[in-house]
Image (spheres, rainbow, N blue to C red):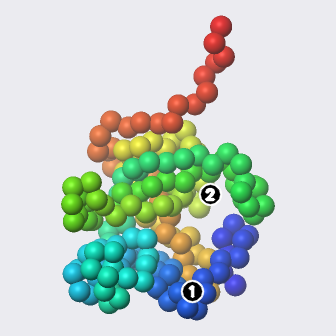
Amino acid sequence: MAEYLGAQVIVPPNDPAHREYLEEAAHGRLSVQRCGNCRHLRYPVRTACPECRSFEYEWQPLTGKGTVYSYYVVPHPINPAFREVVPYVVALIELDEARDTPQPGRALRVVANIVREDGQSENADRVAIGQRVDVTFVHLGDGWALPQFRLSDESPEHETWQIPTRGPAPA
Ligand SMILES: [Zn+2]
């Protein structure tokens, strides 16, 4: 049984593309679908190309490098399985590939957690918009893995910004 943080991960057999995405990750590849017709790279995983509606696709492995585009710190567990892991970071990672494609402002942006070397959630105080990140893979069992991201040693590509934390009460 595939599971993440103690919760069962279920992807039904009639959703082969999502199963393939997790299988690619288990082989150490962050891959997205490349349209077999117009060559558009797409994420999230979906049945048809949002540009040309073709059902044809192949998996395109990417470098796994990106930048924190935005993030949120989840303060309360929305699932009992997450009781022990709050607060944790959910980030929107803009991948290096396909930036400003097919139009300015468009990009491949992946929702993921920012995790430490040991797979636990990164301390929210260390995460900021603009930071560089690298993909890492959390194995779920059953031949699946989940792409997650770790803070990179690379310098931020622009001035970083953090969600303000609550300061001292006003006098
Ligand atoms: Zn297409």
Closest to the observer, 22 or 26: 22
> Any mark on residue 143, and which?
1
Residues at circles 2 and 1 in contact by the CB criterion of under 8 Å: no
> Any mark on residue 120, and which?
2
Q: Image quadrant of residue 58?
A: bottom left
Where disc 2 sits, the SS reads: loop
Q: Would residue 7 appear left or right of 105 to someone viewing this image?
A: right
Badge 2 amino acid: Gln
> Which quarter of the rendering shows the N terminus?
bottom right
Closest to the observer, 137 or 79: 79
Badge 1 amino acid: Gly
Q: Cα distance, mark 2 to mark 1? A: 21 Å
In this rendering, does residue 65 appear at all?
no
Could you say where residue 62 lies in the image, as x and y percent from the top left?
Answer: 32, 72
Of marks 2 and 1, which one's residue comes earlier in the chain?
Answer: 2
* 10 Å crowding of disc 2: few (<14), some (14-19), many (20+): few
**Which residue of the protein is positioned furthest toward the top in this rendering?**
171
Where disc 1 sits, the SS reads: loop
> Which quarter of the rendering shows the C terminus?
top right
Could you say where residue 69 lies in the image, as x and y percent from the top left?
Answer: 39, 50
> Any mark on residue 125, and which?
none
Could you say where residue 24 lies in the image, as x and y percent from the top left?
Answer: 44, 82
**Which residue of the protein is positioned furthest toward the front in this rendering?**
53
**Residue at left offset 41%, top offset 36%:** 161
* 10 Å crowding of disc 1: few (<14), some (14-19), many (20+): some
